[in-house]
Image (spheres, coloured by chain):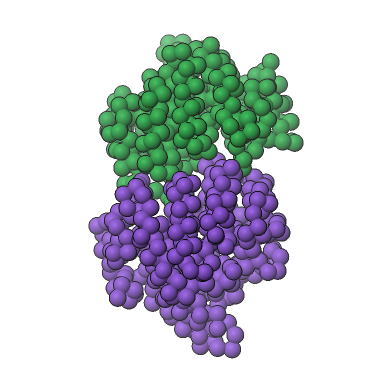
Chain colours: A purple, B green
Amino acid sequence: MFTGLCAFPLTPLAGDDVDETALVRLVARCVDAGVDSIGVLGSTGIYTYLLRGERRKVVEAAVDAAQGTPVVAGVGAMRTRDVLGCVEDAQAAGASGLLLAPVSYQRLSDDEVYRLYCDVSSASDLPIAVYDNPATTGFTFSDELHGRIAELPGIASIKFPPPAPGLAAERIASLRAAVPEGVSLGISGDWAAAEALLAGCDIWYSVIAGLFPKAARVIVDLAQTGQGDQASHGRLALEASAALEPVWSLFRTYGSLRVAATMAEVLGFAEAPCLPRPLQSLHGEGRSRVEEALRLSGLGA
Amino acid sequence: MFTGLCAFPLTPLAGDDVDETALVRLVARCVDAGVDSIGVLGSTGIYTYLLRGERRKVVEAAVDAAQGTPVVAGVGAMRTRDVLGCVEDAQAAGASGLLLAPVSYQRLSDDEVYRLYCDVSSASDLPIAVYDNPATTGFTFSDELHGRIAELPGIASIKFPPPAPGLAAERIASLRAAVPEGVSLGISGDWAAAEALLAGCDIWYSVIAGLFPKAARVIVDLAQTGQGDQASHGRLALEASAALEPVWSLFRTYGSLRVAATMAEVLGFAEAPCLPRPLQSLHGEGRSRVEEALRLSGLGA
């Protein structure tokens, strides 16, 4: 399941509540574009800002709207007890996979993180993607720890953060050497996706695909055929990604969540404001830059 | 209220539940030792690991056990909505003050943090301490932002992280220049407290005082009289703190929460394990070092 394109839609709010109508609309766009899976309650899906009951409803609504496209649900939380509650809910709601980051307030030790994955691995039969995101969790995985966790039953993928330009192949080789065969490697950080897919990454965990799944689908298809005898496809994948550089640049400056939320507001996919306070979508100059980026990249058309 | 010694007791768990009996025992120790205030649901009180209802019960139990000693309640949460819920509960439970950190998953902007404090300032009449803890929140306050926030109604104190040895006076001078007169400055990072109090800090936000309030009381009393004509008291304050260096060293190595929890387990103040998974108290070598530190510092007697 953890191959190809996984689209991460926003969980838009209307007031303090999840806007299920807007969420379902985003999920339907992903299904129509033929994404391979839909990741709800990722960082883009504001999982850590929602209560357990809100998260359960998001998974239920997404599974219903996904019409058979597999739904991966983020189950991270500060406390193992609460993670396990979300696992139970995601499973009951029909999720096909789990995404788990070691969310922390106190910085966690390697052993604490390992035991967290042990606890979730033994609590569920669903395949689990390890979510490695030091920018939000403050936790840095070593390859050695990735290797130990990937040996656990059910660990099926690693979602890793964007390497610096030119370093994707090296990063992937080093992870491949650390984890058992069959564990898929997935890139996050949309600007790094084309290079990582060409270097043999199995899946793109994509923020932009939550809003513009067709644009992301094109890049994945070109990159994955471009690995073999169709080298020209590889160049086209890189060009298609380069055309979105105005968006990638904003992702790096403001964080992809704020930019995606602002795009959704600008394009009428969500009400404004659609983020939970204290988070804010962009205003003033930032919002103008988002509008300009949509124009320059052709995404707003 | 934000002067002198504020003791931060653990919120011990028994199984998955808050051990109210153990909590009340810790609060009573603080009251008996004459602390100036009791800070529940600080980092040591595992606030981010508890649900709203659990947090409400902790404040209620602490206020009841505090017998008039002011209780400051931590109200930080990822989402402003949930912060405001905790503020309402803390106020209803009889807390005398609030402690608010900009808890985050997505790194917050200065403007987002400022608006968070605006929202809480206008929602409550209780005095608020700004909790500046980049190690757990990932957010770094500039002095300029501290200054702007401290102008808001109700902002009464800043709990700031430990400066490097020898730099407390400079740090305090720089904060004093940034904030309005009357806003108290409070040191956290127990090993830095004696120096900071001697340099004119108004309050020690103390982890060790949650377990050993008398030892902390001695340091505060010596340091605060040592600022004036009794210079010898200042030296005694530094010596009393230096005697606890075996403990401070462990705080810096393992984090004060894990060390305090292990001490509580070793001394029978709490059941083992008293921390919420994935957090673990220390085992093996770490636990032996805690036992040794208790012996060396005379705290275990």
Residue B234 visible in the picture: no
Q: Quadrant of the N terminus of chain B?
A: top left
The residue drawn where x is 58% and y is 32% is B17
Q: Position of residue A79 (x, y in %)?
A: 56, 42
Q: Nearer the viewer, residue A253 or A180?
A: A180
Q: Residue at x 66, y 27 (%)?
A: B271
**Residue at image x 45%, y 53%?**
A57
The answer to which image quadrant residue B247 occupies is top right
Is residue A206 placed above or below B52 in the rendered structure? below
Q: Is residue B134 above or below residue A102?
A: above
Q: Is residue A291 left or right of residue A48?
A: left
Q: Nearer the viewer, residue B292 or A189?
A: A189
From the viewer's side, name the closer residue of B182 and A196.
Answer: A196
Q: Position of residue B20 (x, y in %)?
A: 56, 24
In the rendered image, the vertical position of residue B75 relative to residue A291, given as above or below: above
Total count of labels: 0
Q: Quadrant of residue A229?
A: bottom right
Q: Is residue A21 left or right of residue B33?
A: left
Residue B286, horizontal then vertical, whole percent: 70, 35
Q: Is the residue B256 above or below the residue A6 in the image?
A: above
Residue at the location (38% across, 57% down)? A20
Q: In which quadrant is the C terminus of chain B drawn?
A: top right
Residue B32 x, y percent position in the rendering = 53, 11
- Residue B118 visible in the snapshot: yes
Question: Is B134 left, or right, of A113 in this rendering?
Answer: left
